[in-house]
Image (cartoon, rainbow, N blue to C red):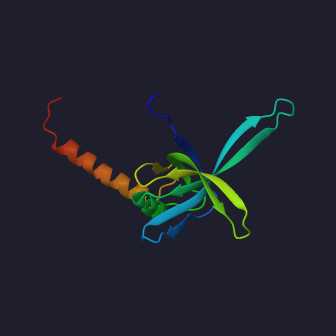
Amino acid sequence: MAGFLNKVMLIGNLGKDPEIKFMPDGSKIANFTMATSEYWKDKLSGERKEKTEWHRVAVYNDRLVDFVEKYVRKGTRLYIEGQLQTRRWTDQAGVEKYTTEVFLSKFKGEIAIMDSKRTDFDQASVDEHSKEATDVELNDDIPF
């Protein structure tokens, strides 16, 4: 086998507003946490149960960081696609720490808003698409 697969796809809600940071080279990164939940009915009690998992997300793709900065807020339902990455660092007390996060690199990754409510971005896209579709229907000379 030539390679291995490291791919994560999540649909969840943001726990708080994204944090935008600037790197020394001037590029921006976005960090946020996403919650994914699963639900089931307890067989013994009949009670509805829920388990929520929190995921750290780090976005290094400039285009996606701009999108996150402009349109994503606490509670936004997102689809993200990236890779798992574990970082290691030493804190101020000299203790070595680790964190695993979903990483969207400069050249890979996807983000899409999954909310049913429309944002300004969603509305603009829908209006442009509708206008284009109408123009095509009116100017279409193809007989079938």
Residue at 46% across, 61% down: 65
Q: Furthest residue to the right?
A: 44
Horizontal side, residue 28 vs residue 47: left or right:
left
> Which one is in front, 101 or 91?
91
Q: On the rendered image, what quadrant is the C terminus found in?
A: top left
Please say if 91 is above or below 46: below
Q: Furthest residue to the front?
A: 94
Please say if 135 is above or below 20: above
Residue at 31% across, 50% down: 129
Query: Residue 9: where, in percent of width, then height?
Result: 54, 42
Residue at 21% across, 44% down: 136
> Which one is in front, 142 or 63?
63
Note whether residue 115 is visible.
Answer: no
Q: How many marks?
A: 0
The answer to which quarter of the image holds residue 19 is bottom right
Note whether residue 19 is visible.
Answer: yes
Query: Residue 137: where, in percent of width, then height?
Result: 22, 42
Query: Residue 133: where, in percent of width, then height?
Result: 27, 46
> Which one is in front, 29 or 114?
29
Please say if 117 is above or below 25: above
